[in-house]
Image: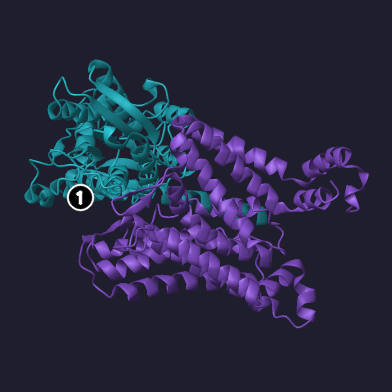
C-alpha cells in the first residue's frame, strides 16, 4: 500500500495518464463491440486490419500535430494555416509532376525534385508565419489566419483551379506502399517524423529553448536566448511538417485537390495537442502526449465507422466523447477527483507518502 | 444674399445629381435600338469546381449582349449573407430578371418578397431553397432523383433478378439537395427489388479522403459481400475505388465490384472509359440555354413550369468512347 501511494499520486498528476486512459477505453470498447478489431492480416501485400488502419489514417494528423505542438509550446498560440499549407505544398509538387496536364501518368520533372519543392513551399509558408509572429509581433492565430484564408486560393492558382490527377504509380509510394514493403508508407513516415522531432527536442537544446521561450519570452531573452529566432524556427518546422503531410496526403489519394486536402485538419491537430495534456498557453510540452492525442482522435473515428454509427449521428457521438475528455481533463474536475481519492488513500497522499 | 447663393448652389447640385442618375438610361436609349433585357445572376461561387465553372460560363454565353441580354454577375464566394445582399442590390438596380444559385437553402423569405413586390421574376438555378413557392417564378436544374433512377436502372441490368445484390451507399453531404434526391432513388429501388440489400450507408461529405477511409472500414466488415458501390459523386467514387484496390479487390469492368458515380466530370469519364467506374450519371451544368428559354417564354407572355428539368444522360463503361469525352465542354 505504501508503494502504491506515490504511484497513485504521480498517475493522478500526470496529464499523460489521462489521454492514455481514454485511448484504453476506446480500445476496450472495441473488444466488446467489434471482435475483429484486432485481427491483422496481409491482404494484397499490405498488413491490414483496424489497428494498422488507425495508424495509417492518423498519420497526417500525427505529422501536423508534431509541428503544432512546437508552435503552441513556443508561442502560446496556434497555427491555423497548416491545412492550407498542406494544399500549397501538394500543389507545387503536383504542378511540377504533371506540368500543364490535369491527368497524366508521365512525370514532367524528377519525383524527388518535386517533393523537395513541395517541402520548400511548406517551409516558405512557415517562414512567412514566423516572420509575422516573431518579427512583427502579431498574435499567432491572427498571423496564421492570413494563410488560413488565402492559402487555398494560392494553391488553386498554382494548379490552375483544377484537381490534378497524378496517375504514375510511383507517386503513390509515399502515401500507400513502396513495392515489396508490407507496411504502409504513411505509417513509416509518421513514425520517422515522430522519432526525429522527439530526438530533436530531447538530444538538442531545441526542446529546452522552446519551453523556456514559451514559459517566459522576455526572461529567456534576458538570459541570452534569442526568443525571436526560436519562435521563427517553430513556425518553419511546423510549415515543413505540414508540407510533408500535404505530400503524403495527396500521394495516398493519387490526386491534388487544393480545396479538400487537409481541410479542417488544423482543428484536429489543436485538439490532439490539448488531449495530449499539453498546455495551450505555451511552455511545457510532451511529444508523447500529442502523439497519443492524435491517435485517440483517429481511433474514435475508426471505431464509430466500425460500429456502423449512422451518418447523421456520427458527429454527435464524436462531440459527446470530446466533451467528456475535455471536462475530465480540466483542473477543476481533477481537483474534485483528487479530494475524493484522498479519502481512499489517506490524507498524506498529497504530501507524498 | 449669402443664403440665396447657398440655396442656389444646393439646387444646382441636386439638379446635377438628378441629371447624373438620369444619364445612363437616356444614353442607353439613344445607343441601342432594341432594348437589352437586364439579368442579375447571383452565383454561389463561380469557380468552386469544374462543374460550377462550366455552369457560370454557360449562363454567360447564353445571356450575352448578342443574344439581347445584359448580364450582371455577382459572385458571392459561398457567403450566404453576401448573396442575399447581392440579390437586394439587383432589386435596387431594377433589373428585369434575377437568377439565383443559392449558397444556402434558408433565409430567402425577405429578399424574395422584396423582388416579388418589385415585380421581378426570380429563377432559381440548380439549387433548391426552403421558401414558399409563390416567392419565385421557377426552378431549373437537374433532377437529382431522376439521376438516381438512371443509376438504379443500370443496377437492374447488371444483376439478374435471382442474384443477391449487396449495395453500399456513400452519401453526399447530408441535407444537400443532390444527396437527398440520389439517396432516395436508391432507397426506393431497394424497396422495389427484394434481392437488393443496403449493406451500409454513410456520408463521405463529397470528399475523396473520407470516402476512402469509410470504404476501407467496410471492406474489412463485409469483404467479398459487397457487390455494388453507389457513390453519390465522382470524388467519393474515386476514394472508394482506391480503398477497394488497395485491399486487392477487383473493381468495375464486367465482373468486378460494380461502381456507380454521379456528376460525370472529365477525369471520371476517363475512369469510366478505363472500366473502373461502371455507370457515371451526368449532372448537367449547362443551364444557360434553359434559363434563356425561360426568360424568352416570360417575355412572350407565357408562364414557365414551377419545375423545369434539363436533359441528363448517363455514361456506361462498355459504351463510352474517347470521342464522347473529348466532345464534352467540361
Measured from the top left, where is residue B172 in percent x and y? 36, 36
The one nearer the camera, B224 or B87, is: B224
Q: In the figure, is residue B137 to the left or right of A349?
A: left
Residue on which disc 1 sits: B266
The residue shown at (59%, 53%) is A292
Using the image, determine if residue B18 lies above or below residue A111.
above
Question: What is the display colour for chain A?
Answer: purple
Q: Are there few (<14), some (14-19), or many (20+) residues within 10 Å of tag 1?
A: some
Using the image, determine if residue A255 lies above or below residue A5.
below
The one nearer the camera, B118 or A132, is: A132
Q: In the figure, is residue B167 to the left or right of A7?
A: left
Name the image quarter holding residue A21.
Answer: top right
Measured from the top left, where is residue A62 in percent x and y? 52, 57
Chain identifier, colour cyan: B
Count of labels in the image? 1
Is residue B91 visible to the viewer in this orientation of the structure?
yes
On-image quarter of the N terminus of chain B:
bottom right
The residue shown at (84%, 37%) is A340
Measured from the top left, where is residue A166 in percent x and y? 26, 61
Amino acid at each position: 500500500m505504501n508503494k502504491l501511494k506515490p504511484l497513485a499520486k504521480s498517475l493522478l498528476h500526470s496529464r499523460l495518464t489521462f489521454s492514455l486512459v481514454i485511448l484504453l477505453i476506446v480500445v476496450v470498447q472495441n473488444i466488446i463491440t467489434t471482435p475483429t478489431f484486432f485481427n491483422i492480416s496481409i491482404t494484397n501485400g499490405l498488413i491490414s486490419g483496424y489497428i494498422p488502419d488507425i495508424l495509417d489514417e492518423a498519420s497526417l494528423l500525427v505529422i501536423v500535430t508534431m509541428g503544432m505542438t512546437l508552435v503552441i509550446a513556443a508561442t502560446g498560440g496556434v497555427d491555423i494555416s497548416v491545412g492550407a499549407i498542406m494544399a500549397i505544398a501538394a500543389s507545387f509538387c503536383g504542378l511540377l509532376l504533371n506540368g500543364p496536364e490535369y491527368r497524366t501518368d508521365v512525370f514532367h520533372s524528377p519525383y524527388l525534385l518535386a517533393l523537395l519543392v513541395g517541402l520548400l513551399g511548406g517551409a516558405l509558408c512557415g517562414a512567412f508565419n514566423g516572420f509575422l509572429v516573431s518579427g512583427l509581433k502579431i498574435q499567432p492565430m491572427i498571423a496564421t489566419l492570413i494563410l488560413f484564408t488565402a492559402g487555398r486560393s494560392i494553391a488553386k492558382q498554382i494548379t490552375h483551379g483544377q484537381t490534378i490527377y497524378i496517375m504514375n504509380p510511383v507517386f503513390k509510394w509515399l502515401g500507400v506502399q513502396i513495392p515489396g514493403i508490407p507496411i504502409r508508407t504513411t505509417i513509416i513516415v509518421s513514425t520517422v517524423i515522430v522519432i526525429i522531432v522527439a530526438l530533436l527536442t530531447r538530444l538538442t537544446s531545441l526542446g529546452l529553448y522552446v519551453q523556456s521561450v514559451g514559459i517566459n519570452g522576455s526572461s529567456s531573452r534576458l538570459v541570452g536566448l534569442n526568443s525571436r529566432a526560436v519562435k521563427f524556427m517553430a513556425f518553419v518546422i511546423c510549415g515543413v511538417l505540414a508540407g510533408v503531410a500535404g505530400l503524403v496526403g495527396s500521394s495516398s489519394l493519387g490526386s491534388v485537390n487544393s480545396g479538400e486536402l487537409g481541410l479542417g485538419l488544423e482543428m484536429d491537430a489543436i485538439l490532439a495537442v490539448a488531449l495530449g495534456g499539453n498546455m495551450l498557453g505555451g511552455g511545457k510540452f510532451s511529444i508523447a502526449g500529442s502523439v497519443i492525442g492524435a491517435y485517440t482522435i483517429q481511433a474514435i473515428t475508426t471505431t464509430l465507422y466500425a460500429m456502423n454509427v449512422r451518418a447523421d449521428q456520427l458527429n454527435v457521438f464524436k462531440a459527446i466523447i470530446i466533451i467528456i475528455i475535455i471536462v475530465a481533463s480540466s483542473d477543476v474536475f481533477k481537483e474534485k477527483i483528487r479530494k475524493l481519492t484522498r479519502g481512499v488513500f489517506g490524507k498524506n497522499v498529497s504530501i507524498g507518502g | 444674399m449669402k443664403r440665396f447663393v447657398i440655396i442656389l448652389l444646393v439646387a444646382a447640385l441636386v439638379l446635377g445629381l438628378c441629371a447624373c442618375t438620369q444619364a445612363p438610361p437616356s444614353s442607353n436609349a439613344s445607343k441601342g435600338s432594341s432594348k437589352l433585357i437586364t439579368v442579375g445572376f447571383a452565383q454561389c461561387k463561380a469557380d468552386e469546381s469544374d462543374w460550377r465553372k462550366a455552369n457560370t460560363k454557360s449562363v454567360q454565353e447564353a445571356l450575352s449582349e448578342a443574344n439581347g441580354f445584359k448580364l450582371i454577375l455577382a459572385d458571392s464566394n459561398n457567403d450566404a449573407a453576401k448573396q442575399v445582399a447581392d440579390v437586394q442590390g439587383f432589386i435596387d438596380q431594377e433589373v428585369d430578371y434575377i437568377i439565383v444559385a443559392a449558397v444556402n437553402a434558408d433565409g430567402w423569405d425577405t429578399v424574395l418578397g422584396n423582388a416579388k413586390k418589385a415585380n421581378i421574376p426570380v429563377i432559381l438555378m440548380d439549387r433548391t431553397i426552403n421558401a414558399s413557392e409563390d416567392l419565385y417564378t421557377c426552378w431549373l436544374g437537374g433532377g437529382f432523383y431522376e439521376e438516381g433512377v438512371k443509376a438504379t436502372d443500370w443496377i437492374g441490368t447488371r444483376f439478374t433478378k435471382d442474384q443477391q445484390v449487396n449495395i453500399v451507399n456513400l452519401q453526399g453531404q447530408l441535407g444537400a439537395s443532390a444527396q437527398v434526391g440520389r439517396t432516395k432513388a436508391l432507397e426506393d429501388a431497394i424497396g422495389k427489388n427484394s434481392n437488393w440489400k443496403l449493406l451500409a450507408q454513410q456520408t463521405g461529405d463529397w470528399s475523396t479522403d473520407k470516402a476512402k477511409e469509410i470504404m476501407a472500414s467496410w471492406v474489412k466488415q463485409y469483404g467479398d459481400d459487397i457487390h455494388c458501390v453507389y457513390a453519390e459523386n465522382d470524388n467519393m467514387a474515386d476514394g472508394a475505388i482506391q480503398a477497394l484496390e488497395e485491399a486487392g479487390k477487383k473493381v468495375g469492368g464486367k465482373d468486378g465490384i460494380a461502381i456507380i458515380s454521379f456528376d460525370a466530370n472529365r477525369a471520371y469519364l476517363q475512369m469510366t472509359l478505363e472500366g473502373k467506374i461502371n455507370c457515371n450519371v451526368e449532372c448537367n451544368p449547362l443551364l444557360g440555354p434553359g434559363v434563356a428559354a425561360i426568360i424568352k417564354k416570360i417575355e412572350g407572355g407565357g408562364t414557365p413550369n414551377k419545375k423545369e428539368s434539363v436533359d441528363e444522360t448517363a455514361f456506361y463503361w462498355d459504351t463510352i468512347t474517347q470521342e464522347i469525352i473529348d466532345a464534352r465542354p467540361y
